Amino acid sequence: DGGITQSPKYLFRKEGQNVTLSCEQNLNHDAMYWYRQDPGQGLRLIYYSQIVNDFQKGDIAEGYSVSREKKESFPLTVTSAQKNPTAFYLCASSRAGGGTDTQYFGPGTRLTVL
Amino acid sequence: QQQVKQSPQSLIVQKGGISIINCAYENTAFDYFPWYQQFPGKGPALLIAIRPDVSEKKEGRFTISFNKSAKQFSLHIMDSQPGDSATYFCAASMTGRRALTFGSGTRLQVQP
């Protein structure tokens, strides 16, 4: 099956801890993205990567970090510097970057800070 | 300039009725306008998309109407069904830009 997997589905974190969210795709897509979704708001871009070993900040990158060491993987770390990390996190990929290629989304990870 | 405004925030429609969701944008450089459908606890999935060289695109019961001069576009769901109950997001982007700019979403409930 081709697609995007995110793990875990639910994640609980204590204040002051860093956590890493996994995103893997087997679609052979070059571009990958991380979005944050809060109730009543649209998806907001955290980071994106158009090729391996390269990534750029999105609109709300503060308190987050990413890496892109492999084409199929784009993990997101939520650091203790993120003031309000409780949210639904969505990973996406597209054949190429540029915004006009169809983005395919994973099932999401719901992060709750206790 | 990058914002996409979506309305209404929520919508209740009877089975068989027409659901209409509207979006407006400011940046005239946008040239790609997709709609995404999201069911609870799932990631969004592309429903239908349009480029500004056409005023309407139809796929089954779903139609996008596009008004370039007004900088508005809308999603029409004909013969709405309970299975259409979901959150719908409009989005916009431009060739060469990094990613999509999403509207705030519309929660649609189709009553049987």
Image (cartoon, rainbow, N blue to C red):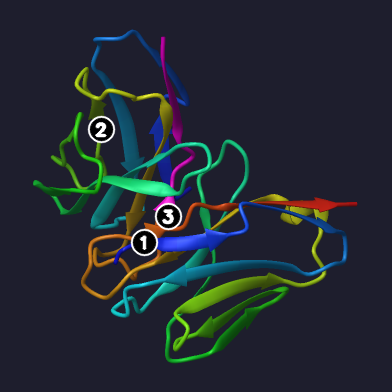
Magenta stretch: residue A110 in it? Answer: yes
Evaluate whether residue A70 shows in this view: yes
What is the CA distance from the residue labelled 1 to the residue labelled 2?
25 Å
Looking at the rendered structure, whether the residues under marks 3 and 2 are on a common chain is answered as yes
Amino acid carrying mark 2 in the image: Leu
Q: Tag 3, which secondary structure?
A: strand
Name the residue beneath numbered marker 1: B3
User: Quick one: A95 or A20, which is closer to the camera?
Assistant: A20
Image position of A62 (left or right of B39): left
Residue B13 lies, with reference to residue A110, above or below; the image says: below
Mark 3 vs mark 1: in front: 1
Q: How busy is the neighbourhood of tag 3: few (under 14 within 10 Å), some, or many (20 plus)?
A: many
Q: Foreground mark, 1 or 2?
A: 1
Residue stretch in magenta: A104-114
Count of numbered marks: 3
Q: Which residue is mark 3?
A: A104
**Tag of residue A76:** 2
